[in-house]
Image (tube, rainbow, N blue to C red):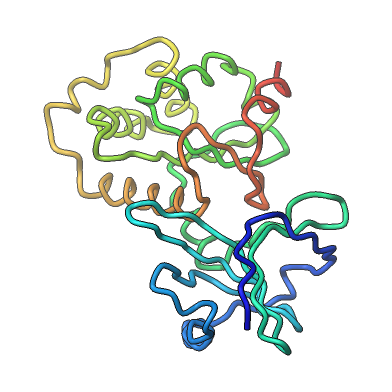
């Protein structure tokens, strides 16, 4: 057994459909963790897929306080473990598919949806985020014409105003009013959410905020704004802005 320690790109031409692959159980991941190359305490096997002759693994590597996601490929016959990036025939990066559990978390994390476009996208955002506000200003009135947008709020504890902002937005009676309230805060600088700062966030909203964080984690969103298609593939923000302008 050997581990390719270099993180240089490994080229695999794959035509496998992820829908045909089966996710490994916790017991199977535990068995793989006994492999000498994977036994390190710095490695956590998060998920795995049985692809026939190969296991495709999603691994968390931790060094001191820093965490990094790695992808590994285990040859069943030789038990050789390789770490790197795999590519599909069209040259695109072969992404680790979302498990049914992850997809469920993502969909449960949607606060509301808006737009009449045929294409669906997921938007991870925060009403108190300056970069998110910049995006809203650049696409106001346009994004919903091309896309059906599913909004996931990524609210961290250090965003002190965000819970109140989100509570006021979600207090809108329907998706149209919620979208208008979102734009009022992020584009127009509305302060109508201020009364919500003076009271505790409702248990129901706390629960939804927690679901939003779980959804952003399932999407592996490292910040905001971030956008994903229906296959949960990351969409370049700049290209998205250009597509609607």
| Left or right of residue 7: residue 123 | left
Q: Is residue 145 above or below residue 208?
A: above
**Along the line of sight, which residue is nearer the eye, 154 or 69?**
69
- Image quarter in which the C terminus is found: top right
Residue drawn 17% across the image and 22% down it? 195
| Left or right of residue 197: residue 24 | right
Residue drawn 44% across the image and 50% down it? 109
Residue 121 drawn at (x, y percent):
62, 40
**Along the line of sight, which residue is nearer the eye, 238 or 183?**
238
Q: Is residue 179 above or below residue 27?
A: above
Q: Quadrant of residue 198?
A: top left
How many numbered marks appear?
A: 0
Residue 80 drawn at (x, y percent):
67, 80
Residue drawn 41% across the image and 67% down it? 42
- Image quarter in which the N terminus is found: bottom right
**Along the line of sight, which residue is nearer the eye, 115 or 29?**
29
| Left or right of residue 100: residue 110 | left
Residue 185 drawn at (x, y percent):
37, 18
What is the residue that sits farthest to the right in this orientation? Answer: 89
Residue drawn 75% across the image and 83% down it? 52
Residue 44 drawn at (x, y percent):
44, 70
Q: Quadrant of residue 157?
A: top left
| Left or right of residue 243: residue 131 | left
């Amino acid at each position: 057994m050997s581990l390719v320690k270099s993180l240089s790109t490994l080229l695999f031409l794959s035509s496998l459909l992820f829908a045909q692959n089966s996710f490994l159980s916790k017991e199977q991941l535990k068995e793989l963790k006994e492999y000498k190359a994977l036994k390190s305490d710095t490695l956590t096997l998060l998920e795995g897929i049985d692809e026939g002759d190969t296991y495709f693994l999603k691994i968390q590597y931790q060094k001191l306080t820093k965490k990094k996601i790695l992808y590994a490929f285990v040859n069943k016959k030789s038990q050789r473990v390789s770490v790197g990036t795999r590519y599909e025939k069209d040259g695109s990066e072969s992404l680790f598919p979302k498990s049914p559990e992850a997809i469920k978390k993502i969909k449960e994390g949607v606060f509301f949806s808006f737009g009449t476009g045929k294409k669906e996208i997921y938007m991870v955002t925060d009403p108190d985020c300056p970069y998110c506000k910049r995006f809203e200003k650049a696409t106001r009135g346009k994004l919903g014409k091309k896309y059906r947008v599913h909004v996931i709020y990524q609210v961290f504890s250090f965003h002190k105003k965000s819970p109140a902002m989100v509570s006021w937005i979600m207090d809108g009676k329907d998706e149209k009013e919620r979208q208008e309230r979102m734009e009022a805060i992020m584009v127009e600088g509305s302060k109508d959410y201020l009364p919500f700062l003076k009271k505790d966030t409702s248990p129901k909203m706390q629960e939804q905020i927690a679901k939003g964080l779980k959804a952003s984690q399932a999407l592996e969103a490292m910040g905001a704004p971030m956008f994903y298609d229906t296959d949960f593939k990351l969409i370049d923000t700049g290209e998205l802005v250009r597509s609607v302008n």
